[in-house]
Image: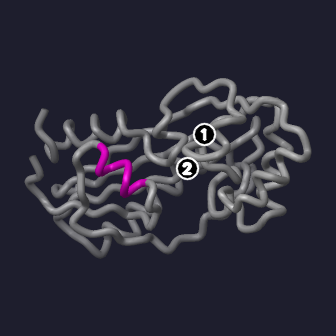
């Protein structure tokens, strides 16, 4: 199945686990150290695409003639980009904003083939949280589950009990759109059908 060296340009344990779900085990996992600050007036979809590309090039420059996969997930309410929650206050603010509202989860995915060809995709999933009461938000904050997560929550945990609607890829919301990634790997010649 695997013919060439494959590098995952991400330190996310969720992305590594998701890749394994489709039978892909990277030869190396290398985190890309880039500035993830949105540019002035940058839209969420554009940010996800740009950061995936920058992560790809940061790692691919050091690893020629290999397959390199990079991704970046951005959570947004309208045009407002939500942070990767660094603390309890970030989680609290994100949940209050998303409570009872629709938000989008965009993941930009970029793949460089061993021949240097670049493939890019953007996945867009819609999520609606039910209206959450203050005590529910506090209980989730106290769980610690939202720390380090884009938008301050992890769909594969407690937060699933607050989600009333999903449209699009579930794996995208976790952190890597597997359908798109599998198609890119097949198209690139990394995996045979």
**For residue 120, which numbered disc appears in the image?**
none
- Residue for badge 1: 105
Kind of element beneath mark 2 = strand
Q: Is residue 104 left or right of residue 175?
A: right
Q: Quadrant of the C terminus?
A: top left
Q: CA distance from mark 2 to mark 1?
A: 7 Å
Q: Residues within 10 Å of mark 1 (few under 14, many from 20)?
A: many
Position of residue 121 relative to residue 13, above or below, is above
Which residue sits at x=21%, y=36%?
A: 187
Which residue sits at x=76%, y=67%?
A: 87
Q: Is residue 10 left or right of residue 152?
A: left
- Residue for badge 2: 73
Q: Give x and y (percent) for residue 146.
A: 68, 56
Q: Nearer the viewer, residue 77 or 92?
A: 92
Position of residue 160 relative to residue 56, above or below, is above
Q: Which residues are magenta?
A: 15-21
Q: Give x and y (percent) for residue 50.
A: 53, 53
Kind of element beneath mark 1 = strand
């Amino acid at each position: 199945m695997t013919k060439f060296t494959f590098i995952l340009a991400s330190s996310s344990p969720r992305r590594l686990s998701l890749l394994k779900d489709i039978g892909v085990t990277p030869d190396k996992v290398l985190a890309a150290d880039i500035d993830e600050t949105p540019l002035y007036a940058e839209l969420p979809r554009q940010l996800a695409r740009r950061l995936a590309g920058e992560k790809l090039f940061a790692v691919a420059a050091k690893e020629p003639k290999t397959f390199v996969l990079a991704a970046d997930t951005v959570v947004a309410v309208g045009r407002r980009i939500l942070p990767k929650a660094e603390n309890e206050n970030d989680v609290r603010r994100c949940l209050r904003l998303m409570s009872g509202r629709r938000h989008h989860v965009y993941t930009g995915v970029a793949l460089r083939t061993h021949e240097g060809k670049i493939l890019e995709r953007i996945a867009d999933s819609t999520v609606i949280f039910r209206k959450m009461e203050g005590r529910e938000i506090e209980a989730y904050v106290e769980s610690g589950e939202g720390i380090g997560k884009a938008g301050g929550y992890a769909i594969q945990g407690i937060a699933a009990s607050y989600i009333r609607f999903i449209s699009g890829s579930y794996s995208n919301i976790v952190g890597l759109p597997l359908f798109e990634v599998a198609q890119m790997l097949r198209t690139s010649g990394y995996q045979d059908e």
